[in-house]
Image (cartoon, helix red, strand yellow):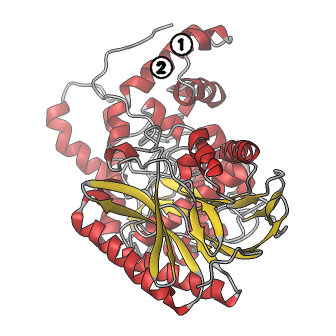
Amino acid sequence: MSQEPADQLLIALAQLNPVVGDVDGNADKVREARALAAGQGADLVVFSELFLSGYPPEDLVLKPAFQAACRAAVEALAAGTADGGPALLVGAPWREGDRLYNAALLLDGGAIAAVRYKVDLPNYGVFDEKRVFASGPLPGPMAFRGVRLGVPVCEDMWSQDVIECLAETGAEILLVPNGSPYRRSVYDERMNIAVARVVESGLPLAYVNQVGGQDELVFDGASFVLNADRSLAVQLPNFQERVRLTRWERWADGWRCEEGARAPLLLDDEADYAACVLGLRDYVEKNRFPCVVLGLSGGIDSALVAAMATDALGPERVHAVMLPYRYTSDESLAAAAGAAQALGIRYDVVPIAAGVEAMEGALAPLFAGRARDVTEENLQSRLRGTLLMSISNKFGAMVLTTGNKSEMSTGYATLYGDMNGGYNPLKDLYKTQVFRLSELRNRWKPAYALGPSGVVIPANIIAKPPTAELRENQRDQDSLPPYDLLDAVLERLVERELPVADIVAEGFDPALVARVERLLNIAEYKRRQAAPGVKVTARNFGRDRRYPITNRFREGA
């Protein structure tokens, strides 16, 4: 194959959705993308970080059999490039001696033409790569058909040292495979870092990111190309798969990508909603659940989850069940039925009075002489959880739980009751955002959503004061501060880790802040047992924030 310097390169960016552990399936996706790119005349197809294993593989990557499967897949893909078609730049775990690396491999001409290892292994927030990978040496460029390609892997782009080394050793184009999960504000952060590296190196940069849900993480794609003058040449959409051909030409001052399609990105609340839908869809699909079931109470949380589930899976795969008791209002019954009808989903009513009374009767001898309290309220929630799990067992549907981040922060949820379920799309959304997203969904939905357009969450649900309806005339604000105040304090405690004194100095009531901090701390044992759910904030309860359950430290006010 000729190694004469190229004057033009056609590079396909493969923004795709791998499945962790499905090495054969991911390799098939590589072949499909290569065939598509070959039809467009591509010279090279670039995939995201650790595409063959799926990202993040966590401790799965330590299994020798899994490492061997990934190596065999790389070798088979390399052999397939002997046909003279496009080369592949693909990520995989790669063992050399007693060290395991996060590798980017160039496959061309029937062989593994070059291998580069990730240098900067992130070990913060949701990342824990130092646990499983060894850090590679500072890399030089890969020689590809007369062009020198710099391949910093994901976090390596955030390092001046790696990009500086590539520039100083002759790299002409930077190709960055990524496994970068979504969170609010991430686009500005990525772009600012990419621009800084382009300015420092004087090199154009193509950023290729994974898309799709993996447990609590959602990868948003949003791949892009920056030219050396910092101009945005190409922008792929977020939350959607794409294989996009980019055209590059060599000029006197270096390589330049021809201006191509620049898709508008979903931002802010729209991006959060899209992330929740995609994360839910992939959790259900990748774990092979046929459908989902949820308790539809007539409240805003369960109505939003029903809308997200319908958008993710289609109405025919969503089953809503109203589980009324004596405290369930006629308004809630009508609201739940209205939401189900608007979404076009199956809706059943299963009264729980007989079951609650039977449970209370069984406990009556033990509880004799004691006043009714939250115990009896929780029996209602726990029976509802048991019934939903029974429906799950009988029909194979996964139970969706519907608690929001405000509730999970303060422990306003019942273990083995409303916390029952396999997945929670609202887990990282505060209550105030639940209201915003509900209003948003009534006027907009993602392009790939499978639910109906228009109003799907009735106005009376949005207007209704939040209540668990576990006793007469109950309101959430009987037990919690108003949600606008609560969420403002929680955002400072959880997302920003501000000291209590600093929050009080902003003008918040000291007693309120102390109370919220106490509730946050004592609810850790509940959060540890909660279902996984989509991450959208800077610090979700799970991979981001790992607090001890047994913990006596309190700041006070």
Mark 1–mark 2 CB contact (< 8 Å) = yes
Name which residue lies at 42% across and 76% down. 290
The residue closer to the viewer here, 392 or 139, is: 139
Secondary element at tag 1:
helix
The residue closer to the viewer here, 459 or 96, is: 96
Q: Is residue 445 above or below residue 45?
A: above
Q: Position of residue 553 (x, y in %)?
A: 36, 14
Name which residue lies at 27% across and 57% down. 62
- Marks counted in the figure total 2
The residue closer to the viewer here, 93 or 403, is: 93
Q: Is residue 316 above or below residue 399?
A: below
Q: CA distance from mark 1 to mark 2?
A: 8 Å
Q: Residue 319, which numbered label?
A: none
* Residue 71 placement, left or right of 213: left
Q: Quadrant of the N terminus?
A: bottom right
Q: Position of residue 210 (x, y in %)?
A: 56, 62
Which class describes the residues within 10 Å of circle 2: few (<14), some (14-19), or many (20+)? Answer: many
Secondary element at tag 2:
helix
Q: Which residue is mark 1?
A: 500
Q: Position of residue 355 (x, y in %)?
A: 29, 54
* Residue 409 placement, left or right of 459: left
Q: Which residue is mark 2?
A: 517
